[in-house]
Image (cartoon, coloured by chain):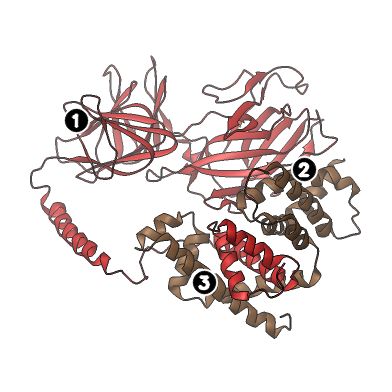
Chain colours: A red, B brown
Amino acid sequence: MTSVPDHERLITLMGLLIDQTIGADEIRELNDCLDGCRESQLLYKRYLDLHCSLRLELHASGVAVVATPVFPIRRSAIAAIVGALAVALVAVFVVNMGWPSAELKASLGQFEGDVVVTGVDGEIVPASYGIGLHPGYTIETRGSDSFATLVFSDKTKFVLVSNTSAAIDENELTNVLVRRGRLIGQVESQPIGNVFRVATPHARANVKGTQFVLESRQDRTDIRVAKGRITVADANDGQPVVVSQGKCLVANEGSALLVQETDAGNFEWSEDFESGLPGHWRKGDFESDELPNWSKGGVRAVKHQDNGRVYYQVHSQEEWARGLFAYRDDLHLNITFRMDQSSWANVFLIARTGDAESHKTRLHKYTIPLGPGSDRVWWKVTVPLSQFQLQTANGFENVPPTQDEMFFGMLLSSPAPDRGLVIDEVGVKRGGPGKVVLKRVE
Amino acid sequence: MSDETHADFLRIYTSHHRTLYRYALMLVVRQADADDILQEASVALWNKFGDYDPDRPFLPWAKRVVFLEVLKFRKRQRSSPVLLTSTVIDQLSADDSTHEEVLELQREALGNCLKKLARKDRILLDARYGDNVNLGEFAESIGRSVASVYVTLSRIRKKLLQCVDRTLRAEGLL
């Protein structure tokens, strides 16, 4: 216990503490400063509260980082600026005159996580920013947090989102085969006669001057066009169809191509499990016993392990390209559910921005608390989507979703041991009470 | 528990959620830990809501429940490095109305102090708190080391604290 706390030193220690850069000796020193000293404790409370206020207030005000650098530029950066000017001059030349050789080149742009590049002969090419990608190369993003960007010299860009495998055709750089996974494409306008071809096991798309998102699964490919249009044929090169802006193509194995209105215009979604689990349902067992009188089906949470922790989860299908529903301020989530043994359950809504540029998934969370007297009782909870918290680098914050978000999945998670979480119905509707309501279902 | 009581609980819990979160964060520092604790506390509060006397203030009662969840959390996380000792946590958790009054006024004064910050300081603060930005990438984009960004952040927070101090002194609270 210290009797003379040093104000300045305490502030330094608290700064290290909240930025998570504090060492063991400094932790001891901080505790010594705080122990038994009311003045230091008040300063600590104020500092932590200030930290918390900044997090809450700055997020609430919707601030964004201004891109213009106003910090002093280091001398070492001057060389980089000279280089950038040279690049800019070349860029001006390219924009006006085209590439001198008129030959398209491709390279690996930004990437994150476990990205594996394989060369023509199957050799692993170490992934690094700017390495050339040539015909016959394969690029794979492994794990849920990885992505890789394929950048072409005409500024065409393909972003391979997590768990995606794509290959460049052995003969043609502009032919990209997506074996599985999710891809965001921004294809620049092409000279007459030129076109990018993006193929999956179920469809072949000709793209030029287009922004689109594509998801290839075992039995189906979805392509949603965000800007421009795409001509798509099935894997057997059958009659092509045109998919225009705002529409989604569904290529099911063995079925005719289907063009649908995209769900970006849909603000409602529901599942009642009356005839089993919907196709591509990710997690949960179909349940037909001990349901409410009117119901024939529900879904029971199943065990899931994450970083050594055990949860019991229900995970909906993920419609990454098509989306399940888009956000509006008056949306309410309704879930009819039961727990054999009451506890909290987290509802996560999984979203991405509706444009074709962002590859990051956004996670929104709401915690439903259930206490005693609620075991084996059917409940209906209604939660305005505006009350969900957004996952940020700092954890979950009180930030509502935004209108550019497209929700593509839902996950319910309850803690171990198994609480017997069963869902009878789940859905999102426009309109509702504007507050959280939890009611017993008779 | 009747439907009305559920509704009462959710209403009162939602309105005090932020304060309880601040309280948990003060005791455990890490945001993810505070999130976990509040999840467990929400169920514990529901469990005990029948014991709650509506004629008494909700917050001190709820804080006590959150504190117990903090202790349980620390027990579960015994293998993780401890930031604050049990003795210090115990002392910090004590309800102190003077401290609460100071914190309340500090929150009110903070808005004006933020407006007085230099533009470059405000940009850095926004990058740290306002946007989902990785501070390492941000540091790289402005040609600075992460360590130097942390030092600057610490300086900005100190500056804000000093600005708030002036308001608190004027109110006779410091």
- Identified by mark 3, the residue type is Ile
- State which mark lies toward you, 3 or 1: 3
Where does residue B76 sit, x and y in percent of width and height? 70, 41
- In what element is the residue under mark 2? helix
Residue B4 left/right relative to B161: right
**Quadrant of the image occupied by residue A23:** bottom right
Which numbered circle lies on residue A378? Answer: none
Where does residue A223 sit, x and y in percent of width and height? 37, 31
In this rendering, the answer to whether A111 lies above or below A335 is below
Which quarter shows the N terminus of chain A?
Answer: bottom right
Q: Are marks 3 and 2 in contact (CB under 8 Å)?
A: no
- In what element is the residue under mark 3? helix
At x 82%, y 49%, the residue is B8
- The residue singled out by tag 2 in the image is B43
Residue A122 at least partly seen: yes
Crowd band around label 3 with a 10 angstrom C-alpha radius: few (<14), some (14–19), many (20+) = some
- Identified by mark 2, the residue type is Val
Query: Alpha carbon of mark 2 to alpha carbon of mark 1: how far?
Result: 57 Å
**Quadrant of the image occupied by residue A307:** top right
- The residue singled out by tag 3 in the image is B156
- Identified by mark 1, the residue type is Pro
**Quadrant of the image occupied by residue A76:** bottom left
Q: Earlier in the sequence, mark 3 or mark 2?
A: 2
In this rendering, the answer to whether B49 lies above or below A62 is above
Where does residue A183 sit, x and y in percent of width and height? 36, 35
- The residue singled out by tag 1 in the image is A135
Closer to the camera, A215 or A190? A215
Where does residue A284 sit, x and y in percent of width and height? 62, 24
Same chain letter for marks 3 and 1: no
